Image (cartoon, rainbow, N blue to C red):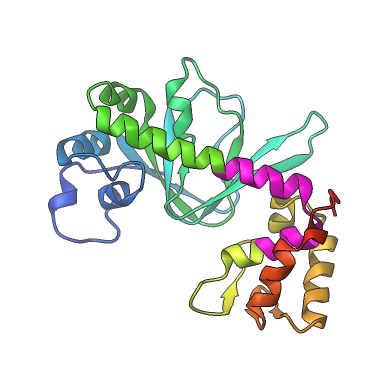
């Protein structure tokens, strides 16, 4: 379901559900003036997705880029044999497909579907690109954002290609664990997480069981309690992690 975004609403008092406020608080759009933000809102819409519903498919024309307002979505590609490879998981506050606006006649290189009930804000790519031509500051902000994303992807390639399955699982848990508490819930199913870090679901479960048996953490369904964060950090940086093993 698509819902238009109302311009000028960013100045109408604090409302955490306000789509314009979500756009202004996003890293990519935080440098926009109120006039620029109104223009973006005027050409934006909120899309509500059910669990499993598709946002766009691989190979379709790029007409928008997206901000995840709530929920969780998977970015994935399908092989010729129909096997799914999850490329990324996008949750609250994350942008999707923002780099594609610079490409003429671009096609989406991945498919995206909801992993849970979600809301995304669709931003008109053509109008936003036209607006960039009149704002050098916004261009530099966007370039910085894309540069950080590139560095993140390079680091992720290193983790997936060089690290053992245990190191990948531990690194994932440390990334998701809040800094101020040791108990948290996995944000997606174990099957989705396993696919995201390129291990088999049974391997993911086995590694969690081994970490539990060592007294480093406790697993209760989707809830993780870390008992020794320092030991997990040592595992994630141990030289034995870098063997090139894939599972």
Percent of width and height locating residue 196: 69, 51
Q: Is residue 67 left or right of residue 167?
A: left
Residue 43 visible here:
no
Q: Nearer the viewer, residue 186 or 122?
A: 186
Considering only vertical position in the picture, is 183 above or below 4?
below
Q: Nearer the viewer, residue 197 or 18?
A: 197
Considering only vertical position in the picture, is 6 above or below 220?
above
Magenta region: 152-171
Magenta segment includes 167: yes
On the image, which quarter does residue 83 sit in? top right
Identify the residue shown where x is 74% and y is 41%: 84
Identify the residue shown where x is 36% and y is 42%: 28
Q: Is residue 131 left or right of residue 195?
A: left
Percent of width and height locating residue 52: 60, 49
Percent of width and height locating residue 15: 23, 61
The N terminus is located in which quarter? top left
């Amino acid at each position: 379901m698509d819902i238009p975004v109302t311009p000028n609403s960013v100045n109408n008092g604090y409302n955490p559900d306000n789509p314009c406020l979500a756009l202004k608080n996003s890293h990519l759009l935080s440098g926009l003036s109120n006039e620029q933000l109104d223009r973006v809102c005027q050409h934006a819409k909120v899309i509500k997705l059910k669990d499993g519903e598709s946002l766009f498919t691989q190979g379709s024309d790029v007409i928008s880029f997206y901000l995840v307002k709530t929920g969780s979505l998977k970015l994935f590609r399908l092989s010729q044999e129909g096997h799914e490879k999850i490329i990324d998981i996008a949750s609250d506050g994350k942008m999707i497909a923002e780099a594609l606006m610079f490409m003429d006649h671009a096609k989406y290189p991945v498919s995206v579907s909801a992993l849970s009930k979600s809301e995304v804000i669709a931003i008109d790519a053509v109008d936003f690109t036209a607006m960039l031509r009149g704002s050098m500051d916004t261009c530099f902000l966007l370039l910085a954002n894309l540069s950080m994303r590139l560095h993140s992807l390079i680091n992720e390639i290193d983790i997936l290609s060089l690290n053992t399955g245990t190191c990948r699982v531990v690194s994932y848990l440390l990334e998701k664990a809040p800094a101020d508490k040791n108990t948290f819930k996995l944000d997606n199913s174990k099957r989705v997480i396993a696919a995201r870090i390129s291990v088999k679901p049974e391997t993911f479960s086995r590694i969690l069981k081994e970490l539990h048996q060592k007294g480093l953490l406790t697993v209760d369904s989707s809830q993780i309690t870390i008992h020794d964060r320092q030991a997990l950090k040592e595992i994630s940086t141990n030289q034995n992690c870098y063997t090139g093993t894939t599972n």
